Image (cartoon, rainbow, N blue to C red):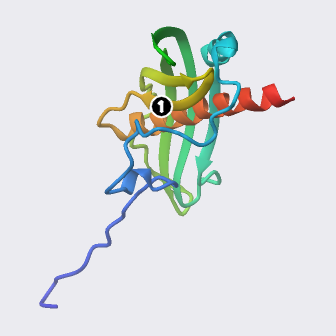
């Protein structure tokens, strides 16, 4: 080192699931083969629509103690859910569409002191979602969940929570049919 040169540490932030730091990721439209409930069929469409139309998810994650690291808070809800049918011989397809709304918050803390609120105090990302379902012989063969995403970390965080919410509602339907 010459003279007054010094080194500055670099802080690299990422989400807990590393989504924000991924260089290569699977397409969000990638189909979801595992976890398709047997009950995801025409007879249960009203239940599916009803569950999705009022679905909500809220929570906190990350450094909940707010001492060191990122703390996240979210509130997600779905609305205006509708269904469109696209039947072909031997294959039935339908698409469930709706809107999602959210309120998300992130803060970064170091040694118990808040050093940043990268999304501000009132970030409200929103968008549309769709679930494409393909039935063969009245049984769901393929389900694709698509959630609007934008080039914005707050929106992508909220979109991930929307996808988790939809997946959990689909799995809940399968569990309820077994009871």
Neighbor class of circle 1 (other Cα within 10 Å; few <14, some 14-19, many 20+) is some
Residue drawn at x 57%, y 36% is 164
The image shows residue 99, relative to residue 26, as above or below, that is: above
**Can the viewer see residue 42 in this picture?**
yes
Left or right, 62 with respect to 29, comes to right
Give the residue number, with chain letter if any, for mark 1: 144
Residue lying furthest left in this view? Answer: 2
Query: Depth check: 34 or 163 in front?
Result: 34
Tell me the quarter of the image containing the N terminus. bottom left
Instruction: Compare residues 63 and 137 and report the one nearer the observer.
Output: 137
Q: Is residue 92 visible?
A: no
Tell me where residue 35 appears, x and y as whole percent.
Answer: 64, 40
Residue 28, given in percent of the width and then of the height, sits at 41, 39
Name the element at disc 1: strand
Q: Is residue 118 above or below residue 14?
A: above
Residue appearing at x 63%, y 32% in the figure: 58
Identify the residue at the far right of this view: 179
């Amino acid at each position: 080192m010459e003279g007054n040169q010094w080194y500055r540490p670099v802080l690299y932030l990422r989400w807990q699931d590393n989504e924000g730091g991924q260089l290569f990721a699977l397409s969000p439209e990638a189909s979801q083969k595992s976890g398709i409930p047997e009950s995801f069929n025409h007879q249960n469409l009203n239940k599916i629509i009803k569950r999705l139309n009022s679905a909500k998810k809220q929570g906190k994650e990350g450094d909940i103690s707010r001492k060191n690291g990122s703390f996240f808070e979210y509130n997600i809800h779905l609305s205006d859910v509708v269904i469109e049918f696209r039947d072909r011989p031997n294959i039935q397809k339908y698409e469930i569409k709706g809107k999602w709304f959210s309120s998300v918050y992130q803060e970064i803390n170091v040694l118990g002191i808040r050093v940043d609120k990268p999304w501000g105090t009132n970030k409200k990302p929103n968008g549309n979602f769709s679930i494409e379902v393909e039935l063969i012989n009245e049984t769901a063969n393929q389900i694709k969940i698509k959630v609007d995403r934008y080039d914005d970390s707050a929106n992508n965080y909220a979109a991930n929570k929307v996808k988790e919410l939809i997946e959990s509602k689909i799995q809940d339907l399968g569990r309820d049919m077994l009871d």
